[in-house]
Every structure is written in structure tokens, then in C-alpha cells.
Amino acid sequence: MHRLRPGDRGRSGAPVGDPKEIVRAGYDAIAERYAEWAASFESPVGAWLAKFVELVPAGSRVVELGCGGDNPWSRMLAERYEYLGVDLSHVQLARARRAMPGARFELADATRLELEPGAYDGVVSLFMLGHVPRAEQAPLLVRAAGWLRPSGTLLATMGTADAHDEVEADWLGAPMFFASFDEQTNRRLLEEAGLEPVEARVVPFEEPGHGLVRFMWVLAQKSHLRHEPVTDT
Ligand SMILES: C[S@@+](CC[C@H](N)C(=O)[O-])C[C@H]1O[C@@H](n2cnc3c(N)ncnc32)[C@H](O)[C@@H]1O
């Protein structure tokens, strides 16, 4: 099971410097340790990706935000879809490129990423949003909705702790930035972005030594209504 995933619980950390630089430097430093740690237990990822795969046909265009280094879920996405993996950390991306030589990757901050509007059938973001400053989470959801075609599918994890931007001094061996909203706020942000939940719920699970973690798993589809041009009658 995933133990200390971003955004899963409240924290009391130090004041924050540049969040993106903290996250980038953090994952550059801990990429190998993170990979070993994440591979050492199971999380609900498989079950939720199966739901995503049911909604998004093979061969579709899918972008994964915060794809990380090598992991079985990204490999499955890259094999099944016309895949673009995006990550802030060049060490993570170097691992991903080595593991998935045929796949397309881009080194970028997801909150600044420019993609063709309406061109994607799926957006996947697992355990990344909790590393995005609170003020940037709503705009990122709006951008993700903009990249999706109508009825395109989002699969994402969101933190559920009402936790302001904070830095944890030692997260798997490096300082790490976290931020999250509560479940109700997450639902409002999705709605405001024009993303209608197909299934969205908190899936708590016990992590040995770390207690209960509570991520909100979100499978949502882009509303047909929101991005249609308004016409005078
Ligand atoms: C907890 S890891 C998750 C990796 C992978 N999705 C997984 O489930 O194992 C979070 C990843 O998101 C990336 N990340 C965090 N903030 C990001 C941002 N603003 N833009 C792009 N990638 C980001 C990190 O570099 C890291 O590789």
C-alpha cells in the first residue's frame, strides 16, 4: 500500500519557499527511493485504472500528469494509448524514458503545460495534485478539462486534508511540498471546471506504521454543456 502519498493527511510543516522547485528537487533526489517504496505495497490504482480503461477505448489520446518514473500503471497506459507522460522532475522522466522507450514524454510543470484544446480522450493524474499549491489546483482542473474533448475522461487522486501549502522537512529523504482541500471543496472545484464525476469517493486504507490515508479517487467526464459556445437566439 502507498504510505506517505501527497495530500492524504493533515500536516504541520515549515513555511513554503518555491513549491515547484521544492517538488522538482525533491523528486530528482528521491526518484530511486520513491520507486522502490511505491513498488513495495499495493494501492487502489489498479481498480481505478480498470474503470478508466472501460471508458476510454484503446488507441485514444491520453496525457498523464505527474507520471513519475517507471511504474506499471504508466507502462499499461503507454502500451494501450497514444500516450504523453508529463513530469516536473528530469530524474523521474529519465527513468520513465528508459522504461518506456517508445512513449512520448514532456518535462513540464503541469500547471504551465500547453496542450491542444479538446484533443485528449483522457487525462490521468495519480498522486500529483497534492504537490500543487492550493491556488493552482482549480486552474489546473480547468486546464485539464480544456484539453479533454466533450465526454473525455479524467482519472485523478485528490488529497482530502484541508491542509494549506506546507513543506514536510523529510519525505522519503527530501523536503517535499504538499497542499490539499477537503472532499467537499474538491467536488466544488471539479464542478466549476466542468468535470462531472462518474464515480468520486474517498478510499481510506490502513498503512502499516502510518495509520489511515484518505485520498479522493475521481473518475469524471467533461461536461458537454460547459465549453459549448453561447449563441444568441
Ligand atoms: C507521488 S509521485 C507519483 C508518480 C506516479 N504518478 C505514481 O503514481 O507513482 C508525484 C509525481 O508528480 C510530479 N509532479 C509534482 N508536481 C508536478 C507538477 N506541477 N507538474 C508536473 N509533475 C509534477 C513529481 O515530480 C512526481 O514524479
Image (tube, rainbow, N blue to C red):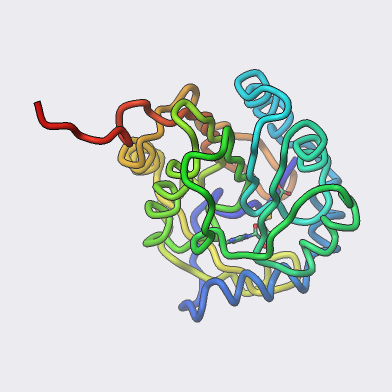
Q: From the viewer's perspective, is 186 left or right of 220?
A: left
Asked whether 68 or 108 is in front, the reply is 108
Q: Residue at x 48, y 77 (%)?
A: 16
Q: Residue at x 44, y 29 (%)?
A: 150
> What is the quadrant of residue 157 in the picture?
top right
- Looking at the rendered image, the quarter that the C terminus falls into is top left
Residue 159 locus on image (x, y percent): 51, 47
Vertical order, 7 against 54 (above or below): below
Q: From the viewer's perspective, is 158 left or right of 101?
A: left
Image quarter for ligand 1 equals bottom right
Q: Residue at x 65, y 71 (%)?
A: 24
- Looking at the rendered image, the quarter that the N terminus falls into is top right
- Residue lying at the far top in this picture: please name it: 54
Q: Residue at x 51, y 37 (%)?
A: 216
Q: From the viewer's perspective, is 55 left or right of 229?
A: right
Residue 47 locus on image (x, y percent): 70, 25
- Residue lying at the far left in this picture: please name it: 233
Residue 205 locus on image (x, y percent): 64, 35
